[in-house]
Image (cartoon, grey):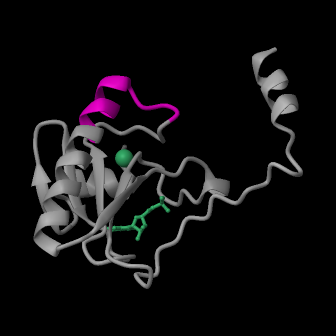
Amino acid sequence: MSNCIFCKIANHEIPGKILYEDNDCIAFLDLSQTTKGHTLVIPKAHAKSVLEIDQDNLAKSFKVAQNMANMLKTKLNANGVNIITNSGIIAGQTIEHFHLHVIPRFDENDTFEINFTDNSQICNLDEVFKIIKE
Ligand code: AMP
Ligand code: ZN
């Protein structure tokens, strides 16, 4: 897509710190460096988000993300990794070209946090199950 910044990086029209490239995907350092080594994996073919991407390209992107995660973990001495993708503004998506964040994790002070809050007291499990299964 002509005005997409990630398409431009994939086409080498604008610079990026590209760590890996093959026919289908590239991996490059995220400008924000949420944690040291924070990397993005994208398919070269434009897709808006995880909800729209062709499943072959989704699988290829996840394979690259797994390889990048292992490589970053080794090179940077990380203790763990989060692989996440945001879809939609409410979910934090700011760039509408599908991307996987590969976020190396070092310790409890590495400033990245995901909270899986226990809301089971206000969100009834049986009711939710019924709605979804109907
Ligand atoms: P999201 O909020 O999930 O859409 O993630 C978009 C990510 O792209 C953010 O973490 C930004 O820091 C990152 N980003 C934006 N522009 C660039 C760029 N030109 N090169 C590398 N990372 C970028
Ligand atoms: Zn694009």
Instruction: State which quarter of the image contains the C terminus.
Output: top right
In x, y percent, where is residue 132?
A: 77, 23
* Relative horizontal placement of residue 73, taking residue 132 as reference (left or right): left
Is 41 placed above or below 57 here?
below
In x, y percent, where is residue 87?
A: 55, 47
Could you say which is closer to the camera, residue 91 or residue 106? 106
Q: Main secondary structure of the magenta part?
A: helix
Is 115 placed above or below 47 here?
below
Could you say which is closer to the camera, residue 3 or residue 85? 85
Q: Quadrant of residue 23?
A: top left
Residue drawn at (19%, 50%) of the image: 26
Is 93 placed above or below 123 here?
below
Could you say which is closer to the camera, residue 46 or residue 68? 68
Give the magenta part as a residue range: 51-61
86 in the magenta segment: no
In x, y percent, where is residue 53?
A: 42, 31
Residue drawn at (27%, 68%) of the image: 79
* Relative horizontal placement of residue 86, taking residue 1 as reference (left or right): right
55 in the magenta segment: yes
